[in-house]
Structures are given as structure tokens and as C-alpha cells.
Image (cartoon, grey):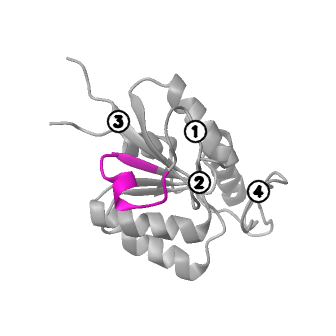
Amino acid sequence: MKSKLINLTITGCMGRMGQQLIKATKKTRGYSLYSLTEYKQINKKISGIKPQLNTKNAFKKTDVIIDFTIPRCTLEVLKIASKLKKRVVIGTTGFTKKEENLIKKYSKKIPILKAGNMSLGINLLMYLTEIASKSLGSNFLSKVFEIHHKHKKGKVRSKQFGRVEIPQEAFIGVLKIKKE
């Protein structure tokens, strides 16, 4: 029995991560690049697809929206995705507390996977730091600082990391869709 391809939309398709995601989608079985979006009109095709603005039409036949943009665009995407009941993976960083709370509200309506860093290695490092921190006791302060490349758009915040809240399985799980 042949399984149906999972249709992906990549928002922020002109950015560094958007470009990497487009390349990865081409190489990965089981996924089809349905649409690409950007915050402004783009007059060229990318991988044979003309990028669109973030609209219902751009997302209507997608299964999962992968968002690596800026907070303002992410919230725009979530507003549309919640109306269409679409899954969203968020890799965007730099949200304010108010924006984080808004994302939590959307997550009660649609499946959302949000991580400031999707790297398995970084998430493992954060997890091991938590274990080491607990074993050292309260006399020590353990921190992991995430440093971004110089081309990073938007706000970058270094913060103390606690436990890893999103394991790799959750990332894969949000992309798996049962088709009836």
C-alpha cells in the first residue's frame, strides 16, 4: 500500500532556513513541496513554485506549514492556520512574552511544534546540561547560551535553558499524518 505524500508549505522561503528546507524537501521521501510564502511579492519561481503571500489560498491544501520567519509573520501564519486547522512547525525566534502567550492560545486550536533550535545536538546538550546541573546542586549555575550566525534576522535572545520540552520524536510526530 502506497502512502500519500505529506504536503508542506515553507514560509520565509527566501531566508537562509527557508532555502535549506526547500533543498531538504527535495531530498526527502514522503513529502511534497505544496507552496512557498514570503512577506512580500516575489516575481520568480523557486523549485518550480511561485512564492505567494501568507493567505488562505497559499495554505488551503497543505498538511503542515513550516515557519522560519519573524514573529510578526509567524502570528499572521498562525491566524490563517488556525482557521484552516493546519499543523504548524515554528522555528522562528525572538518572540515577546505577549506573543508567546498568543502562540499558546493557538496551540489549543491546532497542533504546533515550536523550538528555537531544531538541532538534535543542541537539544541533547540542553538536556545533558540539565542533568549535570541537578547533580551539581545549588552551589553551581549551569547555562547554555545559543549564539546565532551574523545573518540572523529578528531578535536573538540568550537565555538560561531548563529541561528540553520538545524531543526529536515530537518533531517527527507532528509531520506524520494518518490518511484515511
CA separation in Å, label 3 and label 2? 19 Å
Earlier sequence position, callout 4 versus callout 3: 3
Mark 1 residue type? Leu
In the picture of the structure, the residue carrying the numbered disc 1 is 21
In the picture of the structure, the residue carrying the numbered disc 2 is 68
Residues shaded magenta:
52-65
Asked if disc 2 and disc 1 are in contact, CB closer than 8 Å, the reply is yes
Mark 2 residue type? Phe
CA separation in Å, label 4 and label 3? 29 Å
Q: Quadrant of the N terminus?
A: top left
Judged left or right of residue 3, residue 37 is right
Mark 4 residue type? Lys
Q: Residue at x 59, y 42 (%)?
A: 44
> Can residue 14 be seen?
yes
Give how far across and how far down residue 172 sits, in percent. Answer: 43, 39
Element class at badge 4: loop
Element class at badge 3: strand
Give how far across and how far down residue 10 sits, in percent. Answer: 50, 47
Mark 3 residue type? Ile
Q: Residue at x 52, y 65 (%)?
A: 74
Asked if disc 3 and disc 2 are in contact, CB closer than 8 Å, the reply is no
Mark 4 Cα shell of 10 Å, populated few (<14), some (14-19), many (≥20): few
Judged left or right of residue 110, residue 128 is right
In the image, 178 versus 129, the foreground residue is 178
In the picture of the structure, the residue carrying the numbered disc 4 is 152
Is 56 in the magenta? yes
In the picture of the structure, the residue carrying the numbered disc 3 is 6
